[in-house]
Amino acid sequence: MQGAQWFIGGIILAVAIATAAAAQSATPPPAFEVASVKPHTPQLMPGVQAVAKRDPEPTHFQVSGTLVSAIGNLLALVRLAWDLEASHVRLSPELADKWATSEVYEIDARAPGDATPTSAQVREMMQTLLAERFQLKVSRRNQVMPVYNLVVAPGGPKLKPTAFADGAALTRDEGSTRAHFRLRYLNFSMSDLVEAVRRQFDRPLLDKTGLTGGFDFSLDYVAELPPGVTADVAAAMGLPIVASLREQLGLRVVPAREQVEILVIDHAEKPSLN
């Protein structure tokens, strides 16, 4: 009997040691080495009155070496950290129309090590910061919403299989200006194309072409025309993205309603400042 007790005790001890070792060996989430979070105060010219933006949305992180900064309200920072469009992020009822959209914060941080972090690494570290400093909790849900489907236009696609199948997808600038893009895409799949142009649309853009593999193609389009531009001037400047996809690539953009995965901000608290 005593030997059996020792045997059982040994098993319990071994399980406890294994559990403790697993907990110690668990890899912590990527995190900034140091980070500062504080309310953002716009720098204004003397005599200029501040006008608060309800939903400022940064389009990218400012990265200089290992230094990373961003400015935005909680909703905008979450979009940035997960690289999502506005339509893919929702606030829970407890946060809607409250500080999560009205209060703007300035984040300055330093990534660990000496190398410049990648965009993916910066996003992961920002997710950790939001969880620690804002007590952020999110979940993913499916929701039916208005979208644009990218489909093959009548007449078929105007795409050639890539000549660089062994290489990574690449983009070459062929003389773009601020609003007029002239780009060459190499070994791009349709999902790569959707990712490249999705910010030109006010709804999620979904690949429904059924085309597989990589393609080489050029795309020439005007991103956004200034207000008041006449039809003649617009034609001289170039085609908008929808017309360019149709005429240059043989692809059509069709309004639809589809089930889309969204990120829901379930909980957050005002951050600890420093």
Image (cartoon, grey):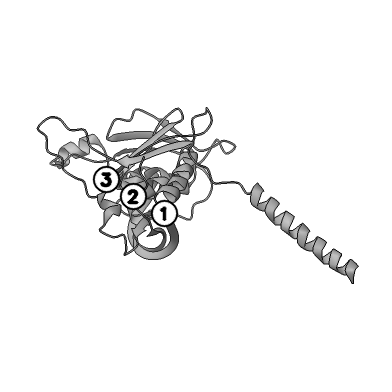
Considering the image in quadrants, where does the N terminus appear? bottom right
Badge 3 amino acid: Pro
Residue 6: give x, y in percent of width and height: 85, 64
Q: Mark 1 near mark 2, Cβ–Cβ under 8 Å?
A: yes
**Disc marking residue 74:** 2
Badge 1 amino acid: Leu
* Label 3 CA crowd tier, 10 Å (few <14, some 14–19, many 20+): some
Using the image as rendered, state which of residue 196 and residue 69 is in the foreground. Answer: 69
Residue that mark 1 sits on: 136
Q: Quadrant of residue 64?
A: top left
Query: Residue, x 9% and y 32% (percent of image)?
Result: 47
Residue 164: give x, y in percent of width and height: 55, 35
Question: Which badge, 1 or 2, comes first in the chain's sequence?
Answer: 2
Label 1 – label 3 distance at C-alpha: 19 Å
Question: Which badge, 1 or 3, comes first in the chain's sequence?
Answer: 3
Residue that mark 3 sits on: 56
Compared with 199, 44 (above or below) is: above
**Extreme residue in the left direction:** 47
Compared with 143, 84 (above or below) is: above
Number of the front mark, 1 or 3 = 1
Residue 224: give x, y in percent of width and height: 24, 41
